[in-house]
Image (cartoon, rainbow, N blue to C red):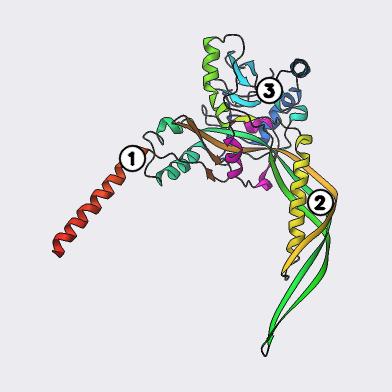
Amino acid sequence: MATMEYKCPKCGAPLSFNPDKQLFSCEYCGADTTVEEIQKIYAQQEQTETINEREVKHSEEAQKKAQAKGEEFDEDAMVSYSCPSCGAEVITAESTAATECYYCQNPVVLGSRLSGEYRPDFVIPFALTKDKAVDAFMKFCGKKKFLPAGFASKTQVEKMQGVYFPYYYVDEQMQASMTANAKKVRHWTTGNRQYTETSNYRLYRTGDIEIRNVFEEALRDKDSAKKTQPDQPMSNRQQNAQQAMSYLNQYKASKRHEMLQCVHPFDVSKAQPFSMSYLSGFKAEKREIGRQEIEGDIARRMDEYAKSLLEDTMNGYESVSPESYNDKTFNQIWRYTLLPVWIVTYKYKGDILPFAINGQTGKIYGKLPVAGGKLVLWGAIVAAIVFILATLGGLLLG
């Protein structure tokens, strides 16, 4: 598995992207390096990190064999690579595109996962540091009085991970037209008589419409309980690595889609042309869904938006009943983009509660658990206070 490792030009230590400075900062010598400098230094190496054809072919053959046998092809099959810093064997999910070595903690980008047709068009870099994300999470928790003990502890927030998620953004220019039947009703009274006049109208609307930034997630919904262990027994080191990457299974549960949708919107005007270097120091997922798989859904959503825009021009009537709709697409642009999200999960009473923080804007999504014991205790205290006040009030009045 081909890997990319970004190192400080001054001292050779591993480099990570610094969201605060929008630079690459070295934790060892303190030197800052611009994105442009890093891209220039590693341009040649990034270009040579093309997809390993044998690996792709093997994956395709494995899928065909599984289909021929009527078996489900495991897209979550684990893949191993050697850390370029310490040489340790590290296990990752097949969709992982950037991670860190679980042994020496150095950031590593898996270049072959992000090349060829899987190379993103754009990336929105993290603008929120982990410290700021933790502060936002703690403030969010501080508003709740009945959290379980240890929920907002240091141990918990240290699990927070910065992850780039794959999304499609679609722009479309079209000409759309709609016909509709409309009705106006007028009431009036003359003398002792009441009158009603109903007027029927035939409406026609047409126009050039531009719809921008319709987005869709490019990861598949997976069951978090799905088997991810290989058939062969793993070594102790591999087991440790598997445990360390357990968060991958957690946020790939059905709640992930809702969680990610709720931290939108992102300011896509600040998206940068994709460079692998932005991923250094973060986790990243490559897309699992091809454009052809969601084109139908995107087309339906575009139609809904266009119809809504045309219907909004048909105001001033008692009722409007659309009759026909037609459109013609002149131009459509797809942008495969990586979006920055801070993720932290919490296991409570058998459930996994995911929390997400928009890595660009700081918007938070998540459901906070309620400790039943604390709630009962608080209810008892309130009841006792009410009883005491009522007793005192009775004595004073008596």
Given the image, on which type of amino acid does mark 2 rest? Gln
Q: Nearer the viewer, mark 1 or mark 2?
A: 1
Which quadrant of the figure has residue 193? bottom right
Q: Is residue 171 magenta?
A: no
Q: CA distance from mark 1 to mark 2?
A: 55 Å
**Residue at (60, 28) in percent of width and height:** 223
- In the image, residue 376 sits, relative to residue 391, either above or below, namely above
Classify mark 1: helix, strand or loop: helix
Disc 1: which residue: 374
Contact, mark 1 vs mark 2 (Cβ under 8 Å): no
Q: Is residue 261 magenta?
A: yes
Given the image, on which type of amino acid does mark 3 rest? Glu
- Which comes sooner in the sequence, label 1 or label 2? 2
Task: Find residue 75 and name its label.
Answer: 3
Left or right, 367 with respect to 15, comes to: left
For the N terminus, the quadrant is top right
Q: CA distance from mark 3 to mark 1?
A: 43 Å
Classify mark 3: helix, strand or loop: loop
Given the image, on which type of amino acid does mark 1 rest? Lys
**Residue 282 x %, y %:** 58, 30
Disc 2: which residue: 173
Which quadrant of the figure has residue 19? top right
Which quadrant of the figure has residue 112? top right
**Residue 102 x %, y %:** 54, 20
For the C terminus, the quadrant is bottom left
**Residue at (17, 60) in percent of width and height:** 394
**Stretch of the chain drawn in magenta:** 252-280
**375 vs 229, nearest the viewer:** 375
